Every structure is written in structure tokens, then in C-alpha cells.
Amino acid sequence: MKTRLLFLAASLFLVSCDILIVEPAYDSRDQVIGSYKVDEYSQTYNEHIRFYVYIRKSGGSYSDNVVIENFYNANVDVRAEIVGDKIYINRQVVNGYEIEGVGTIYFDLIRFNYSVKDLYYDRPVDFCEAKAWFE
């Protein structure tokens, strides 16, 4: 009888325990934060240029937003959003440039396709392709 009572008490004790599993927080922006060397090709002007950009986090802990500093080698900071392996640059006007595009993340390489319109001068829209390597 005592063993049955002890078994019943032990069973009730084990059933009433809560197990708490703490998983580390994953921030999708961590995969792209840092400095990049960019090789940009302008389809509009048939020109190549090399420069550096820096990608930093923007927004709170649960945000997917980043800022790309020195985008288009024009000393402008564009806002972007990371969704999976894509970086979306929604249409925005920054320092006289209208910019929009998308990038695809491949480990330490990002391939961008974007357009830039200079709103100060009457120039054609510049359609660009760029490869950015993590430094």
C-alpha cells in the first residue's frame, strides 16, 4: 500500500512539473550587418564603379529593417527590409534621389538590382546591377 501511495505521489509530482525551454533569439538581419565592397554596373550609362557600403540594423529587436549607408556611392542612406534571402528597397526619395530595388543574399555576397532617378537634374533613370562582397 505504501509503495502504491509513493508511486502515486511521485507520478503526480512528475506530471505537475513545467519544462521551460529558452531558445536563443534569431535576428535575420545579423546575416548582412557589416561593411561591403561593391562593384556596380550602370546599364543606362554602361559604366562600372567600385565603392564601399555599410549595412546596419534599424528599428527594434523584432524588426526586419536595415539601413544601407553610402548607397549608389552618393552618400545616401536607404532603408530596406530583409525577408528570407531578399533585401527589399521600397521606393523612397533620399537626398534628391528616387531609389527602389531588390537584393538577393548568397552567404557573404549580395546581388542588387535597382533603379535611381536623380530628381535635381533631367537625366534618364539609372538602372544598376551590383555585387556586394562582405569585407
Image (cartoon, rainbow, N blue to C red):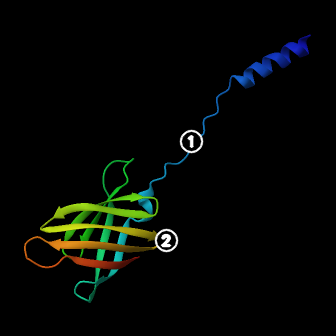
**Residue 135 visible somewhere in the drawing:** no
Question: Label 1 to label 2, Cα distance in Å?
Answer: 27 Å
Q: Look at mark 2 in the image and give the residue it sits on.
A: 107
Q: Toward which corner of the image does residue 53 lie, by quadrant?
A: bottom left
Image coordinates of residue 43 in percent, x first then y, are: 28, 84
Look at 44% across and 69% down and name the residue there: 105
**Amino acid type for the residue under numbered disc 1:** Val
Marks 1 and 2 in Cβ contact (< 8 Å): no
Q: Is residue 1 left or right of residue 70?
A: right
Front residue of this view, candidates 127 and 32 = 127
Q: Is residue 13 shown above or below 100?
A: above
Closer mark to the observer between disc 1 and disc 2: 2
Look at 30% across and 55% down and name the residue there: 58
Q: Toward which corner of the image does residue 120 lie, by quadrant?
A: bottom left
Image coordinates of residue 83 in percent, x first then y, are: 42, 57
**Amino acid type for the residue under numbered disc 2:** Phe
Q: Look at mark 1 in the image and give the residue it sits on.
A: 22
Along the polypeptide, which appears first: circle 1 or circle 2?
A: 1
Q: Toward which corner of the image does residue 34 lie, by quadrant?
A: bottom left
